[in-house]
Image (cartoon, rainbow, N blue to C red):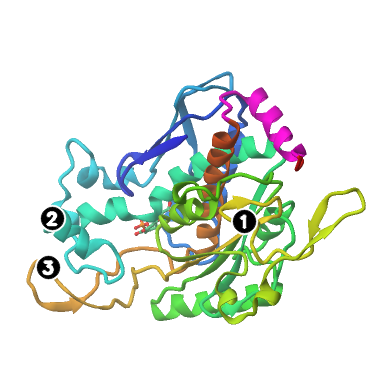
Amino acid sequence: MKYLTAGESHGKGLAAILEGFPSGVSIDCNELNAELKRRMLGYGRGGRMKIESDEAEILSGMFGSVTLGSPLAFFIKNRDFEKWREYTDPVSGTPAAKALTAVRPGHADLTGCVKYGFNDARFVLERASARETAARVGVGALCKQLLKSLGITVGSHVLEICGERSDANPKSAIGLNELADADPVRCLSASASKKMREKIDECMRKGDTAGGEIEVLASGMPAGVGSYVHYERKLDGILAKHVMSVQSVKSVSVGAGRAVASKFGSQIHDEIFPTEDGEYKRETNNAGGIEGGMSNGENIVLRACVKPIPTLMKGLNTVDIASGKATKSAPERSDYCAVPAAAVVIENVVAFVLLNELLKATGADDFDTLFKRVNEMRERKIK
Ligand code: EPS
């Protein structure tokens, strides 16, 4: 599969085309829209999320909610466009009145202007905005529905916001989102959640922003997805590339992640034991479900750190690209903390990768063949 997204944050809306999705999959559009709504939640969002009510209008790729194997296209309307039309209408808009020249450190603003030869960062930020992740979640939500019918569940939770850390260590993705979604910052520890919200309150008071760390788990992946034979086929490499491409992500780790740097091999590698029925098992999962670039049948466990949003109400030292003079960066309306939403986005990005690699491993184009071949993978034995 592959997908493209299009759309500006305050333009008409976002579009996505997902190519290569199998035929014969029943899609629940309510569930797809519920996934879009999950991304909009989280303590610390700004005023924009009160304006939007994301819904995907499916344009192609299914009849009667069953996929055809042809490209799936959908559109998510930006409700805020009504207020921005005069500036951002793709045909008649006159953006000059909304020019942003006090470029924000940490944002794409300055380098985007240099790269494309713009003198107004509005031309950059509208596309660099994390609004684009709504389209990625739509794509991932379609993938998640198919994964679910193959017995594969993907979930996420928030591990840290601005130094406040949760000690939760969920052992399965099954039921994980139900627990995380019940908390305002998608944190499984009530005491850590309270401290995280206090940090976000501090951001709101001081005009600052907060980053954090999230964890994604996928349960039910058969062993052998990805490959050790070539760098481009390694599952961890592919996951890292996709997750790293999500706005604000600065690090991605698999399993024990950076802890491997301080341990002996005997403390890190997941030892393998025979079971009574002639199979084998591991009792730990420091590998995060991936060995040699392949899923090993354990939970896939991946973490990502997201930086604090670069739009600070109190501003940062910068240069006004119109005057060349020192100034404070522009205090655009934005979120104080988007870490809970980032968890939902990354979970959906992971769902796309897992399904895509599963399709490559099985060579299936339709649901029935995929279902059969995934089960064959699960039953595969060493000769
Ligand atoms: C964003 C700034 C804010 C966020 C936006 C991402 O939007 P606005 O400038 O309209 O207040 O709310 O995120 C979304 C709109 C979204 O759907 O997640 C930015 O600059 O990246």
Image quarter where the C terminus lies is: top right
Q: Tell me which residue sits at (43%, 56%) in the image.
A: 246
Q: What is the secondary structure assignment of the residue under circle 1?
A: strand
Tell me where residue 282 appears, x and y as whole percent: 77, 60
* Image vertical order of residue 137 relative to residue 100, above or below: above
Q: Give the range drawn in magenta.
A: 363-380
Some atom of ligand 1 lies within 8 Å of the CB belonging to the residue at label 3? no
Q: Vertically, is 133 above or below 329?
A: above
Q: Which secondary structure lies at badge 2?
A: loop
The CA distance from mark 3 to mark 1 is 46 Å
- Quote the CA–CA distance across marks 3 and 2: 10 Å
Crowd band around label 2 with a 10 angstrom C-alpha radius: few (<14), some (14–19), many (20+): some
Q: Earlier in the sequence, mark 3 or mark 1?
A: 1
Seen as rendered, the residue at the extreme top is 63
Q: Earlier in the sequence, mark 3 or mark 2?
A: 2
Residue type, numbered disc 1 = Ile
Residue 35: x and y in percent read 57, 45
Q: In the rendered image, is residue 198 in sight?
A: yes
Q: Does the magenta stretch include residue 368?
A: yes
Left or right: where does residue 83 sit relative to residue 130?
Answer: left
Left or right of 336 on screen, residue 67 = right
Q: Which mark is residue 118?
A: 2
Q: Distance between the residues labelled 2 and 1?
A: 43 Å
> Residue 296's spot in the image, x, y percent?
67, 52
The residue located at (41%, 81%) in the rendering is 206
Q: Which residue lies furthest to the left in this view?
A: 323
